[in-house]
Image (cartoon, rainbow, N blue to C red):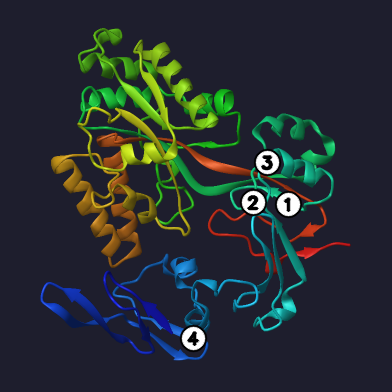
Amino acid sequence: MIWVTTNEAKTQFLKSGNIRVAMADNQGQSEKIISLGVRAIDDYTVQFTLEHAKASFPALVSTEAYRPLPRHIIEQYGDEWTLPQNIQTNGSYRLAEWDKGNRIVLTKNPDYYEADKVNIRKVEYHIVPENSIGLTMYENEALDIIGGAVYLRLPQTEIPRIQTDPKLYKQMHTGEQACTEWYEFNTQKSPTDNVLVRKAIAAAIDKQLLIEIVIKGSQIPAMSLIHPKSFGAINPNEKVGIQFNPEQAKEWLKEAGYPDGQGFPKLVLLHNTSEAHRKIANGIKTLLKHYLNIEIEVRELNWTRYNATIKPLQPMSQNSPHIFRYSGCVKYSDAINWLGLFHSSAGLNWLSGKNSELFDKTVDKAIFAAAQVKSEELSRRAEQILIEEEVAIIPLYFRNARFLVKPRVKGWYNKAFGGQHIRNWSLEN
């Protein structure tokens, strides 16, 4: 059973491969037949028919957009259908208590199809405003897990103490997250409209040094945008992108007309307000002064104003920066998740003219390629345009996460994509 909605359309209920959707247009109401290629073949099975093979499709349908919802409950309770007394779920746990802002309690769902394999009877999520408070709760045996992207992150200032504490160090785990941090160029505003300037700046940034000295974290330097564990990712050993090379950076800057940084115009680097982002931006400023002898101005805005500044495609406006930070995390493994962010339809592609058209066409071909191998080739080509030929962005690092997990929790493991599968865990008495 599938729910389908379109702009200005009434949502319709589907039990077969075709659905009629009433849509508004300039001539009034009309009906269009949409062939979905999906049908419920029994009470427990939905069948999808794809136009072409897609290796990442099983991962795609594991995301929340494909999870079935109880139509009759939503119709009966409306916006209150998620309250503990109303909600119906079909997962391994069900909502027992929701003290908003404080605690969420889940209990084992006896109707789950593999309920006999679910070992933990009750799960409590504590909503904690400060990670320092969360760490204290963990050390006082009030929490079993803290850290990562799903749970409250460990306080950065406490990492050195945790690493030197014999007990806590054994309980600390580091795991990959499907997230990439990058800086993006305004390719239409001088001086970053010059690809040689962009290449020089990219080659002058020592990412490993930023991680070790400025971030002081366990991140992985990124030469590509796409996470290495994704379909279509470039093998890190292929040495794509702009490598850290100060001498080459100086040569590119000289070719651009600014030998040893002479006459280099004002350049603005913008980031959203965050202590971590501030440190990284100032670290980049220091590196560019040291290796290229150029000065950049670092500015920051709160997230609302920041997003309003960079999302609209207004590269030539007075307030638009020359360089700005961004990051992306994805929920399933496919290169298109990242590359799609830079399609001109998404608003983050600040390329122009033929370069933008070439990138868009390459991404479009990758999406609809009949063979997975061909799709991966096209994804690599699109990324090469983005990070090596046009240098529209500078990938900085792939995000890692640190966790503290009590020894009594068995079966826990980090997941780069998606959430945690508590149904597979157990507790040791």
Graded by Cα atoms within 10 Å as few (under 14), some (14 to 19) or many (20 or more), the crowding at tag 2 reads some
Quarter in which the C terminus is drawn: bottom right
- Of the two numbered discs 3 and 1 in the rendering, the one whose residue sits closer to the viewer: 3
Quarter in which the N terminus is drawn: bottom left
Residue in the picture at 26% in, 71% down: 8
Graded by Cα atoms within 10 Å as few (under 14), some (14 to 19) or many (20 or more), the crowding at tag 1 reads many
Q: Please report whichever mark, 2 or 3, sits nearer to the chain's N-terminal start.
A: 3
Q: CA distance from mark 2 to mark 3?
A: 10 Å
Q: Please report whichever mark, 3 or 1, sits nearer to the chain's N-terminal start.
A: 3
Disc 4 and disc 1 in contact, CB within 8 angstroms:
no
Q: Which residue is mark 3?
A: 131
Q: CA distance from mark 3 to mark 1?
A: 12 Å
Q: Which residue is mark 4?
A: 45
Q: Which residue is mark 1?
A: 145
Disc 1 and disc 2 in contact, CB within 8 angstroms:
yes
Q: Please report whichever mark, 3 or 4, sits nearer to the chain's N-terminal start.
A: 4
Q: Which residue is mark 2?
A: 151
Q: Is residue 378 found left or right of 219 in the rendered image? A: left
Question: Looking at the picture, which amino acid does disc 2 mark?
Answer: Tyr
Residue nearest the viewer, comparing 156 with 387: 156
Residue 26 position within the rendered picture, expressed as x and y whole percent measured from the top left: 12, 72
Residue in the picture at 31% in, 66% down: 371
| SS at badge 1 | strand
Instruction: Write down the quadrant of residue 20 in the picture.
Output: bottom left
